[in-house]
Amino acid sequence: MFFLASYWLFAASAILIPIAIHLWNKRQGKTVKMGSLRWLEASASNRWSSIKLHDVGLLLLRCLILLLLAVALAQPVITRPPQTPESQKAVYVGQELLHTSATRQQLQPTIDSLLQRGYRLHTYTPDFAAISQEQWQQLSTTADSAIQHSANYWDLLAALGERHQQPQDSIWLFTSDQQRHFAGTRPDGIPENIRWIPVASEATATWLQAAVQTSPDSLLLFIGNGTRDGITYNRYYTPAAAQSITVNNQQLQLQRQADTLQAIFPDKSISKVEVQTEPLQIAILADEAQQPEVRYLQAAISAISSYTELPIHITSAQDTAVEWVFWLRSDEVPPLLQEQVAEQGLKLWVQPDTEFSAIKASMATAGEEVAVHQLSSITGNNAQQAIWSTQSGEALLTVQSVGKGHLYRFRSGFSPDRSSLGQSAQLPELLLPLLFPQQEAAMYDVRALDEQQLMPAQKVAVFAPEAPEGQRISLLPWLVLAAFVLFLIERVIAGRRAIV
């Protein structure tokens, strides 16, 4: 306890006042003369009588009231120490690991050991949902299930750091190393109280990417194969009326309804695509500064046309009948094109020729390394999804749904001064899934990031937040109340004494 105005304690000396009054007002007994004593003269000598205190209890009560008032004026307060947050121990696991039996069995001994040491289990999702012991045991016996991944694990890392700001917190984080869980720019650092362990995924995927009607009686199918190292496409010819096809020693069931072809794989997964029966119409609109870009782009599209055996018509005129427009100009996209994207389902590729900056990076692709020399400063938003990225996670090509269509933004270029992409044999393979899109392509992407690309480069020190001040509780109201109660008691006692 301490006093905010301690100088008022000197007021406690006021207790001398009731003591002085008490002694001064010493009450004398009434003398009644009896018999012959009435005629005796009073003694001329005055003797001092000894000083004696009377009504000591009443005197002490009055002194106590004054003392309480003096202490109240000094504003006494007591401080309640702040509550220190307890350290937290938690394990966070990506849902793709929880719902895949192979990785779940791989992690189970480690997670069980941590749970026995007092750790709590959570999903690595935006809500960080808790998983009870019973739920964890139930997951251990369930089969694989498909999970729709919408969270960006790099973005979640900042939220996880905000959730655990105590240096004494101990956090274990287990996630897959698949690229589809990471988008945008990799964080510079990771809090040192978080131990992030990427789990290598050996998952593979097979799907129907596209189907082309090469003749009235023949179909050309493009089957995608995804591994942790990359994505490849294989061609398969089949009669138009065929109901099955053998792919990699697997029997695929085929079902066609009008222009839609459905492939059912042995694991019961289903891929649907629109059968391409008409030539693909593409417009490349470029200004003089980007004419070198046009040559590389036309060569890649011609290679795709030769590979798919589907005629692709390329024009340099703005035509409302086209399905794709490559806008390689420095001026703004005309409102007419923007309307076609939203209302007619046009796919628009925007590649401006402004504000480029030098960069030394390479694309995150399988096979040969593709260098990136220049990067534009196109700003993105949360609605854009990265399709092509550098090894460090910097987005090169993003896509955004706009009405019925899609808007693609390319931040580099094809010419040698911007990247080696135009001279790479991978460019047609990278453009193929864009020109012949698979609506569910994201769920088939099982490519992996190297740990050096996935993990933030440095550890960030975690400092305990500034401790809040202790709670101050004022005793002034209670002291005044106590003095008032004692005053009432004093008045009652003094009144009774006066009657007596």
Image (spheres, rainbow, N blue to C red):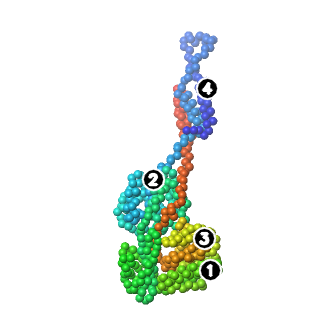
Tags 4 and 3 in contact by the CB under 8 Å rule? no
Residue type beneath disc 3: Gln
Tags 2 and 3 in contact by the CB under 8 Å rule? no
Mark 4 or mark 3: whose residue is earlier in sequence: 4
Horizontal relation, residue 249 to residue 69: left or right: left
> Marks 4/3: CA distance?
96 Å
* Residue at 36%, 66% in the rendered image: 143
Location of residue 225 by image quarter = bottom left
Location of residue 21 by image quarter = top right
> Marks 2/3: CA distance?
44 Å
Q: List the residue tagged with mark 4.
A: 20
Where residue 89 is drawn, which disc sits there?
Answer: 2
Q: Is residue 452 visible?
A: yes
Is residue 296 or residue 112 the one in the foreground?
296
Of tags 2 and 3, the one toward the viewer is 3
Residue type beneath disc 1: Gln
| Position of residue 119 measured from the top left corner of the image (x, y, whole percent) | 42, 54
| Residue 4, placed above or below residue 31 | below
Where residue 374 is drawn, which disc sits there?
Answer: 3
> Marks 1/2: CA distance?
58 Å
